[in-house]
Image (cartoon, rainbow, N blue to C red):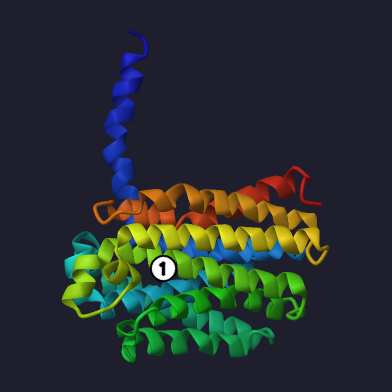
Amino acid sequence: MTNQPTLTSTRRGLPALKAALLVAVHSNFFISLAATSVAVTTIVLAGFRLEVVPLFIVFTVTLFVYSVNRLTDLAEDERNVPGRAAFTRRYGRLSLALGVLGYLVAIALAIAWGLPLAGFLVLPLLVVLLYSTLQLKQVFLVKNLVVGAAWGVIPLGVGVYFGDLWRLEILFLAAHVGAMITVAAVIFDVKDIEGDRAEGIRTVPNVYGPRATRIVSQAANVAVAVGVVAFVVAGALPASFLVLLSFHGYVGGYVPFATPERTPLFYGFVVDGEHVFLAVVVLTLELLGVLG
């Protein structure tokens, strides 16, 4: 009997928690946090010192890019993710204004402090142009590859910021992030099958079906994980990079559940949370002295 109030309070709190998570997902805050998590993982595994500036730049630039994308994809989202579309109609311009402001501040900081990655900050504009304006999403797989490549730039930007771009650790993480975000982008298309078909967009799920998509995605996940182990065993990467296997375990755990009827929280929080999960694991092991 003594546990009943606590249980009841927990149940009452679940809708509020769900609402808060949806706001984080629809507002692009969580996806920006995920991108920042990539920078955190790169900094720790490459042995750099954690600094606020590169993390701020990654967060604000991601917020800018995704805020633009939500507005340009509004018609598509009306079919695929009506909740997100409604949020965008109400708060999209505010989110874009914050994204633009943050992007301009990031550029100003880079120029004022003479940061070596100032030129890198032109890339988000190119991503917006390629993805949204030129409608490359209409071309089979190109959309997924563009998203993967854009995220793969984050470790490269970290390398540029710290003046050590050409280290194998940085290049490997760029390739790793690019490959795995491409896989996640393909998985994301599972929820959009009907909407993409209506828009005439050919994706892996609406061409080959959800089941084949899950099989191929899982195979790619395993292949990249094997690559991580191979590089460590060969001595090309330090043993600390085996922490990436926790990430592959996380991906392997959600892929079987990627079906069209899953809620926006599955895709926007669980799938997009893969790099947040990895950053938490990496930071925890770093604090415990395991990665050192």
Q: In this view, does 23 lie above or below 75?
A: above
Instruction: Tell which of 101 and 201 is nearer to you.
Output: 201
Q: Quadrant of the N terminus?
A: top left
Q: In this view, does 139 lie to the left or right of 226?
A: left
Compared across the picture, whether 175 is left or right of 255 comes to right
Q: Is residue 18 above or below residue 167?
A: above
* Residue at the extreme top of the image, as rendered: 1
Residue plotted at (68% across, 52% down): 243
Count of all numbered marks drawn on residues in the image: 1
Tell me the quarter of the picture where residue 193 sits: bottom left
Residue drawn at (33%, 22%), measured in percent from left and top?
A: 7
Q: Residues within 10 Å of mark 1 (few under 14, many from 20)?
A: many
Kind of residue indicated by mark 1: Ala
Q: Is residue 46 in view?
A: yes
* 109 w.r.t. 239: above or below: below
Element on which disc 1 rests: helix
Check disc 1 and report the residue beneath it: 185
**Residue 212, position as x, y percentages in the image:** 36, 61
The residue closer to the viewer here, 77 or 7, is: 77
User: Is residue 89 in view?
Assistant: no
Q: Is 175 placed above or below 16 here?
A: below
Residue 163 percent location from the top left of the image: 76, 80
Is 177 on the left-hand or right-hand side of 253? right
Look at 27% across and 51% down and name the residue there.
263
State the image coordinates of residue 206 (x, y, percent, origin top left): 27, 69
> Residue at (25%, 69%) from the top-left corner?
88
Q: Where is residue 216 in the image (x, y as percent from the top left)?
A: 44, 63
